[in-house]
């Protein structure tokens, strides 16, 4: 057992490749099921409020466990942690693939989430100690490929499978890859990260569960149930109180579950804020674009997924390139240029109408994804570069948690803006018409144009939100990664949050 975290002399490429493979499968699995929800509803004879738990439950379990990942990474060897997480994920996939009823399917998804929630923080931490800080950009750019591209191609792949095959194939095709990854992990995986004796504060876990779980569920449900729904209000209030108590608890503990001393490093804090705003904008685009393509233009889910695929490919190509550019030019230039492109593309998407060509939709969506690909990993990597190596687990845990919560909040807010504008637009159109002329066909046309206005307005707000992140990038400074600066950083006493 050791509590000294050192940079590895040579990156364990085989282990990193295995982690990439397993994490890609887990991230892909997370986004596969959304398109299949209507089919599953029909097969199990359940309503939407029940079937949405396949996505909401997965997200909740991940959101609850990710803050605990810092403790797990510190306490247990990365070999035992990875093998355990992958075993749990494989078991969940098996249960979901052959579930006899909806209850078993929900259980399988929750078990999957329990396993996959550790993989991303584990991969990121091994990446951070495997590559020197001056070369982290390129390495983290490849990580961005996994984090962003896997969820992006999920709907396209899912749309094809649901249209031509049984939805169970979504799990059955994941299962052999999970088993192969598990066998390779048992055979080849070794421990490269030190462990340290620590203890789990159970009250912190409870507060984290109530806080982050409440926020994630409340904001996720708000987009469909509405902000006035009693369950939504209760969950959000409980979530805010839970997070507040969680923070107070961490500030008073000698060994916190999540060391909030990471926010004493200004570039990490700035990266967290920009990443949160960017995550909200990213998720809004992933919701608003399919709403426009499918509900306004009447394009099938499969074709809609295919239209969004070029954007995913652009991000996949750009992530490693952006990482190398970060190593050369730093985060401010990339962040400013990327967010400028994102803001312009988002603004132009607010001009979508009933006559916009498919090629124009694909071009603007791809341009927006291109801009986002220039921002996320460079800003995040620069922030993590300012943390001492021993705080990496806490930095990655906090970062992943914030992005999940920001994504849920952003989605809820932008969908609510869309719905509110749609209702007011429909009401204003109907108010100017003779009631005797309002037929079912006219109502459908009003609904279509009102929804279009709602989507246009939401994209406009999303563009303004992106401009906020753009302004913040002007205050980002490149972290000094010289040997002298790193030696000083690593020799600093660990920032204590206890009072």
Image (spheres, grey):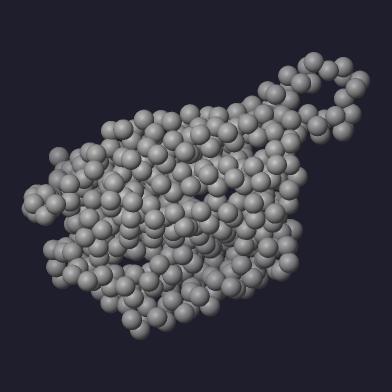
Q: Position of residue 183 (x, y in %)?
A: 42, 82
Q: Quadrant of the C terminus?
A: top left
State the residue in front, 416 or 164: 164
Q: Is residue 272 shown left or right of residue 354?
A: left
Q: Where is residue 140 in the image (x, y as percent from the top left)?
A: 34, 57
**Residue 199 location, quadrant:** bottom left
- Relative to 226, say whether 401 is above or below: below
* Residue plotted at (39% across, 64% down): 119
Q: Where is residue 14 in the image (x, y as percent from the top left)?
A: 34, 76
* Residue plotted at (73% across, 52% down): 300
- Relative to 109, say whether 395 is above or below: above
State the residue in front, 4 or 379: 379
* Residue plotted at (62% across, 47% down): 362
Q: Quadrant of the N terminus?
A: bottom left
Q: Is residue 36 shown left or right of residue 447?
A: left
Q: Is residue 114 visible?
A: no
Total marks in image: 0
* Residue plotted at (75% across, 45% down): 298
Q: Where is residue 452 in the image (x, y as percent from the top left)?
A: 69, 33
Q: Is residue 386 shown left or right of residue 397?
A: left
Q: Is residue 493 shown left or right of residue 28?
A: left
Q: Is residue 415 visible?
A: yes
**Residue 32 location, quadrant:** bottom right
List the single residue furthest toward the right: 436
């Amino acid at each position: 057992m050791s509590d000294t975290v050192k940079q590895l002399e040579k990156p364990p490429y085989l282990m990193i490749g295995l982690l990439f493979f397993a994490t890609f499968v887990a991230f892909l699995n997370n986004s596969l099921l959304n398109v299949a929800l209507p089919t599953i509803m029909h097969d199990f004879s359940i309503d939407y409020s029940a079937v949405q738990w396949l996505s909401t439950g997965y997200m909740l379990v991940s959101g609850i466990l990710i803050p605990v990942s810092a403790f797990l990474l510190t306490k247990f060897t990365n070999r035992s942690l990875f093998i355990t997480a992958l075993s749990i994920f494989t078991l969940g996939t098996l249960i979901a693939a052959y579930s006899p009823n909806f209850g078993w399917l929900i259980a399988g998804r929750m078990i999957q989430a329990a396993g996959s929630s550790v993989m991303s923080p584990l991969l990121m931490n091994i990446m951070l100690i495997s590559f020197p800080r001056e070369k982290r950009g390129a390495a983290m750019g490849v990580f961005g490929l996994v984090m962003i591209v896997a969820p992006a191609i999920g709907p396209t792949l899912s749309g094809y499978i649901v249209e031509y095959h049984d939805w169970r194939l979504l799990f059955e095709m994941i299962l052999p890859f999970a088993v192969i990854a598990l066998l390779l992990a048992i055979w080849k995986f070794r421990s490269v990260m030190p462990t340290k004796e620590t203890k789990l504060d159970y009250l912190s876990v409870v507060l984290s569960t109530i806080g982050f779980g409440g926020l994630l569920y409340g904001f996720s449900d708000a987009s469909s149930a509405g902000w006035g729904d009693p369950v939504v209000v209760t969950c959000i209030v409980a979530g805010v109180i839970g997070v507040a108590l969680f923070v107070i608890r961490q500030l008073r503990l000698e060994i916190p579950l999540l060391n909030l001393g990471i926010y004493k490093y200004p570039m990490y804090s700035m990266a967290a804020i920009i990443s949160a705003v960017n995550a909200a904008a990213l998720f809004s685009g992933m919701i608003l674009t399919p709403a426009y393509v499918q509900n306004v233009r009447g394009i099938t889910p499969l074709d809609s997924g295919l239209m969004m695929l070029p954007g995913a490919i652009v991000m996949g190509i750009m992530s490693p390139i952006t990482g190398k550019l970060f190593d050369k030019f730093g985060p401010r230039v990339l962040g400013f240029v990327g967010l400028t492109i994102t803001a312009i593309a988002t603004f132009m998407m607010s001009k979508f109408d009933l006559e916009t060509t498919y090629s124009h939709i694909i071009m603007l969506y791809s341009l927006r994804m291109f801009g986002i690909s220039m921002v996320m990993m460079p800003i995040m990597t620069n922030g993590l570069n300012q943390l001492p190596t021993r705080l990496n687990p806490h930095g990655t845990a906090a970062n992943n948690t914030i992005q999940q919560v920001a994504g849920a909040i952003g989605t809820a807010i932008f969908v609510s803006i869309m719905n509110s504008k749609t209702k007011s637009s429909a009401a204003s159109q109907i108010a100017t018409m003779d009631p005797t002329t309002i037929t079912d066909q006219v109502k459908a046309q009003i609904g279509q144009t009102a929804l279009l206005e709602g989507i246009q307005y939401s994209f406009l707000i999303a563009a303004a939100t992106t401009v906020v992140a753009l302004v913040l990038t002007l205050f980002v400074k490149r972290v000094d990664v010289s040997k002298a600066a790193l030696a000083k950083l690593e020799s600093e006493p660990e920032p204590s949050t206890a009072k």
